[in-house]
Image (tube, helix red, strand yellow):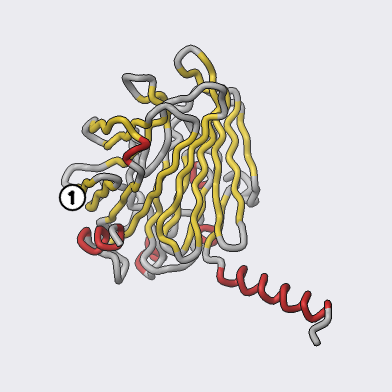
């Protein structure tokens, strides 16, 4: 007969097994001390130059993502050559020698766009960045089988009123795609705008509920020039129009208080998903 102590030991062992299988992690720190934290706030809304990797970051074995702690509030991608966790050791910027030895790199170029799945607001005619704010807060959480990061922008001026907007990005073990959620913490609905950027020469793939791009970004911090793929997956019923402004495809949501999309990425250094054809095949499964 199994007694209570045995049941406790079995339960504890199962928890340890789950944690051991967790291939996700988070990173949030100030550059001045490099001490990992769970939450960082600033009334200015801009810690871009003083916070580690320019904002909170989260990763699974396939990729890492960060949200810029500034008026951009864009989502950026860190690509990996092989499935492993890298943020805590390399802090987004491995040396050239590390990259050539198999570590990942920052091949993605956000520029002045939403990046990959970043969330702003829409005023009926144009995007509204989540700025200025009375407070911006970054938060990271590592759960047994997933990890997520959040950015809360408070008192964003929007169409004659002020709204708080929370953006959450979640990654899970064994799942390449990441979930992006946006919440308007207000009494009245808003229109969100999200999307995916692209650069000259990239191959573009579009169908209902999916926009993908594959090619080289004009990045200047990586040791090598490597093509990468990025994609945003969404429910077409949640959006009322798509706008191509020459550097990004913007998805304008219907009025509401929350929005969900999925984002994904791969790069040419990966052994299995290293071309646009393979990337699209993966996305459409």
Image position of 58 with respect to 49: above or below: below
Residue drawn 33% across the image and 59% down it: 266
Q: Nearest the camera: 157 or 256?
A: 256
Q: Residues within 10 Å of mark 1 (few under 14, many from 20)?
A: some
Locate residue 189, reporting x and y percent: 48, 24
Image position of 273 with respect to 257: above or below: below
Residue drawn 57% across the image and 62% down it: 145
Residue drawn 46% across the image and 67% down it: 84
Q: Quadrant of the N terminus?
A: bottom right
In the shown orientation, is residue 31 left or right of residue 127?
right
Image position of 100 with respect to 254: above or below: below
Locate residue 28, reporting x and y percent: 58, 48
Does the rendering let one see residue 48?
no
Residue extending furthest toward the left = 201
Does the rendering let one see residue 280?
yes
Q: Nearest the camera: 238 or 42?
A: 238
Residue extending furthest toward the right = 4
Q: Which residue is mark 1?
A: 203
The local secondary structure at tag 1 comes to strand
Tell me the quarter of the picture where residue 227 sits: bottom left
Image position of 249 with respect to 25: above or below: above
């Amino acid at each position: 007969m199994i007694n209570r102590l045995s049941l406790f030991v079995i339960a504890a062992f199962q928890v340890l097994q789950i944690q051991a299988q967790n291939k996700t992690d988070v990173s949030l720190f100030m550059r001045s001390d490099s001490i990992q934290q769970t939450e960082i706030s600033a009334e200015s809304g801009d810690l871009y130059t003083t916070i580690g990797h320019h904002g909170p970051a989260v990763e699974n074995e396939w990729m890492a993502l960060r949200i810029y702690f500034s008026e951009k509030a864009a989502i950026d991608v860190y690509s990996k050559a092989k499935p492993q966790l890298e943020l805590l050791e390399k802090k987004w910027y491995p040396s050239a020698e590390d990259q050539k030895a198999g570590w990942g790199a920052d091949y993605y170029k956000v520029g002045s766009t939403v990046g990959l799945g970043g969330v702003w607001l829409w005023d009926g005619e144009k995007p509204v960045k989540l700025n200025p704010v009375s407070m911006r807060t970054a938060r990271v959480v590592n759960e047994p089988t997933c990890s997520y990061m959040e950015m809360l922008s408070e008192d964003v001026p929007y169409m004659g009123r002020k709204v708080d907007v929370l953006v959450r990005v979640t990654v899970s073990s064994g799942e390449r795609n990441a979930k992006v959620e946006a919440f308007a913490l207000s009494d009245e609905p808003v229109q969100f705008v999200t999307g995916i950027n692209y650069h000259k020469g990239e191959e573009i793939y579009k169908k209902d509920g999916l926009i993908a791009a594959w090619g080289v970004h004009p990045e200047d911090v990586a040791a090598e020039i490597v093509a990468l793929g990025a994609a945003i997956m969404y429910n077409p019923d949640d959006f009322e129009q798509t706008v191509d402004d020459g550097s990004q495809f913007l998805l304008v949501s219907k009025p509401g208080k929350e929005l969900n999309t999925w984002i994904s990425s791969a790069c040419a250094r990966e052994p299995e998903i290293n071309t646009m054809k393979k990337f699209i095949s993966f996305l459409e499964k």
